[in-house]
Structure formats: structure tokens, C-alpha cells
Amino acid sequence: SDIEKVSGDYVPSSECPQSGSYTNTWTVTDDCGNVSAVYTQVITIVDTTAPTWSTADNALDVTLECDDATGLAEAQALFPVAMDNCDMDVSDIEKVSGDYVPSSECPQSGSYTNTWTVTDDCGNVSAVYTQVITIVDTTAPVVECPSEDMQPIYFCNPEIGDDKLPIDIPETLPVIDNCDDDVEVIYSDSGITYDECVYSVTRTYTAEDDCGNMSSCSVEYTWSIDSYSNCETAFARYEGDDINAEGACFIPDFDRWGWTNQFVPREEAYIMPFYAGAAQCDYENKGTQVGTISILYWNDEITVTYNLETNTDGGFTTGYVLNEAHVYVGCDPYPENNGTPTVAPGQYNYNLGEYLDYVSNYTVGPISASGPVYVIVHGVACEIVCKCSNPTRDSFDTSGLDGQNCSSNFKETLDETISFVAYPIPFKDSVTLEYEFDYDTDVNFDVFDVKGTKIESISDTNYNKGKKSELTLNMARYNDQMYFVRLTTNRGSIVKKIITRK
């Protein structure tokens, strides 16, 4: 029993420290001191067990939106934890990062597959650990529609396409998507409606990304088209006052209707009704007053302003507008064409032409003028059906055009020692001239038209002082207009205006 054991130390293998051996020896000696041979025991330590994963399967799997770059970076940084039966520091982990694999449905959805293996010091390799990062696109695109407080989108006089819609209505709108850079936008339209000059259509824009996510928005578009009807020839007619006669009808001098009007300078503007469709000058029964004409004749300038009747309500204008305009200002009642009087508007000396952009107010002048002048104001007035636009022209530039000098030597003069009274004013066929002086004299009355031509004379060659006398002028054969009467005595002369109205 005198056995002696020699326990050997652990000797690691050269391949790995977890493999090796222990060598133990024994000898035994009998009572006589005889020693046995050495008995050897070899205990061999091996590591054949592969490391295992302490991170549960699928624990690193994540699902992310396609635009979640932060989440993707965090997911790619994850890794599993391994353990081993012998190797307490299992760190030889190898990762194989997989490329992005798009799905068959859309390129914005897909996955990354990453794998890991770990080897212990003895070369035992673990099973493969797999991480799947799933990328999805579940976010719908956003169509950038105008806000409700910006609708409806309105167009005035737009160009209309073959689809009977304004060509300015966009077929697409800007769209934003989290992942798809080329989102298709399609549209559909409601039926066109019309109410009180306003057309309307609702266009619905729908956007769909590659993954089938959809969104839509609707925009109301409205538009109006200027339209006019019942365009008629129109002329202005002055109703007369205590100085200026009422407008004289073109008939019977001409076949067409209209009026020529005579004015002398005054500080206050003259206002004339503007009649459309007044055939035969019958403005009371056939004509429609579509506005007024203002004539401002003062300080050697005359300005003609058209003012047509309009009313604006809710952004839309009703009433009348002017499409053509022609103005005559001259010393004679009518313009001339090659020396022949005419009332054709195209021959008027201030010819605004056609297509005035359907204006409601228009100014001609100032025109240089002096003396009694005749004015003919013509236009084509149209009734507004629908109107949304504003005219681009509102005046006619007369600079560079000839003025009208109708002055004569027969301006009205007043002298406190020489005077007479004419009545009635206006007169129809005859006018009475009443006079009284405190001296004996010959009395001569001469009548001139506005061009300075003497047309009548009458005299009292035996007047005695202090006597109230009168003479009567027969003016039945003369047209409506203003005349100048000059009274001459041996003390001097004066000139006064008289007016006839038939």
C-alpha cells in the first residue's frame, strides 16, 4: 500500500488553451524496498463543443419605413451575443453584411439580411445567426393642393382648350413622397357647371407611389368669359340751355340719324344723354339711354368724356360698354369729306377707331378749341352679358392733332350805355329786339351765324331819344343754332347771343 502518486500539471495543447492533458504517475515500494515500474495516467482535455448564441433568434430583426435612415443605422449596428462552454471570451465574431434586396412589388420596399458566426479558441464554429432588416413603404405621397381659403382658383377670360376648360388649369400638382422621387399624378374632372357668368369645375388629383400608396386632393377652378350683346349705334344729344340750342338731328340733311351739338365755353361741364338705337332721332320712343357724355369746354380746351351706365356687384359688371368711338369737333355743324358735308363716323376728326376693349369710361382730349364749336359724339354701345376684365385703354391721346379755332370778331360784348333786350330766348320763328336810348341815333341790328357770316339786318333810322322801341326779326328759315346780334348806334356797338329752337 505504499503507493506514491505524482500528479502532473495541466498542459494545454498548442492548438488551444481549452484542450490539453494531465499526466499522473504512480510507483509502489514493497517492504523490502523494491520499487515498481511507473504507472502513468493521461487525462486528455478536449473542446469539441461549438459556441452558442445567447441572443434569441429573430431578436435583432426590425421593420423600418424606407425613409428611416436613423433607424436603419441603429439596426445595422446591432449584433448578437455568443457564449461557449469553455471559452469565456468568445469574441471572434464574424459578420457578413447583406446588400439591400428590393421586393418584387416596389423598389422602395425590401430587406437587408446580415449573418454572424463565432469561433472559439479551439476552432469550433457556431451556427449562423441571422438578422433580417425589413424595409417597407407604407406612407402615402402628399399632393400639394392649394388650401381651402385659397380656393376657388379664378381665371378671367382664359384661353379655352379642346376639352372646353381653361388651358391654365394644371394637369398635375407638386407631390412629395418619403421615398419615391418620381410619383405619378393623374387627375379626373367633375362636370362643368355654369351659374351667373361663372363656370366651375372640380379637378381631383391622385398620386400613387411605386408601392401602391395613394392620396388625393380636389381643387375647384372657376372662370368667366367677357360677353356682350345688342351692340347699337349711339349718339349724344344736348337738351339745350339759355345759350346753347338743343342738338340738331342729322335728318333731313342726311339719311342717318344722330345729332350735332353746338357749345360755347363755360366753366361748368355740359352733360348730354347718350342714346343707342334711336332711329330717326326718336330718342323718346326708340332710343335707350346708355350713359352720358360730359363736355368740358373752358380755357381754350375741350374734353369729351364718355360715361356709360354700369353697375359692379360681386366683382361682375352689368350695364353698357363702348366698343367704338368717334368724336367730331369743328366750326361747322358737320365734318367734310372732299368738301362735301358728311356724318359718317369714320370721317370725324377725332377718330378713336374700333375695338376699344369694351370700356365704360373713355376720355377724348383735351383738344385745343376756341369760339362756338360743334360737337358730334358717336359710339357703338353694347349691353354687358358677362364682364370680369378691366379695359386696357381709357383715353385717346389728342396731342399732335389740330385744334379748332372757331373764334370770330363777333364775341359778345356788353356796354352799360348801349344795350338791348331780345325775347323770347330761345325763339322759334321770330325774335323781338327791344331798345331804349337817351339820345337820338340810327339803330342798326346785324345778325351773324357762328362762322361770322351776316345773315340778316334790320334798322331804325329815325330813333328819338327816350322812346322804347322794338324791331322784329323773321328767323323762320334758319336752323336751330346760336347766332350773334350786333347792335350799332352813333355811340358804339355791342354783341349778344340769341338761340333758336324749332
Image: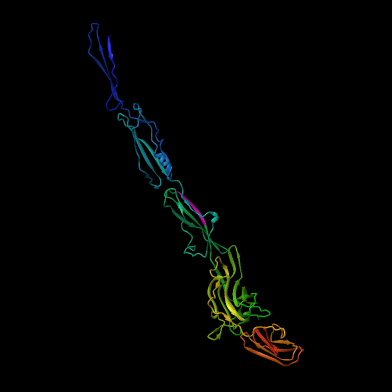
Q: Horizontal and vertical percent for residue 60?
A: 40, 36
183 vs 72: above or below: below
The answer to if 105 sits in the magenta stretch is: no
Residue at 46% from the left image edge and 47% from the top image edge: 139
Q: Main secondary structure of the magenta part?
A: strand
Name the residue nearer the viewer: 14 or 432: 432
> Which x, y percent locates residue 451?
61, 85
Q: Is residue 497 above or below residue 386?
A: below
Which residue is most to the front?
491
- Magenta segment, which residues? 213-219
* 216 within the magenta span: yes
Residue 324, image x and y in percent? 55, 74
The outermost residue toward the bottom is 462
Residue 30 visible to an observer of this rendering: yes
Q: Residue 113 sits in which quadrant? A: top left
- Looking at this rendering, what residue extends furthest in the top direction? 32
The C terminus - image quarter = bottom right
Could you tell me residue 427's position as x and y percent? 69, 84
Residue at coordinates 35% horizontally, 43% vertically from top-left?
99
Q: Is residue 473 left or right of residue 118?
A: right
Q: Is residue 381 visible to the viewer in this orientation of the structure? A: no
Of residues 299 and 89, the one nearer the viewer is 299
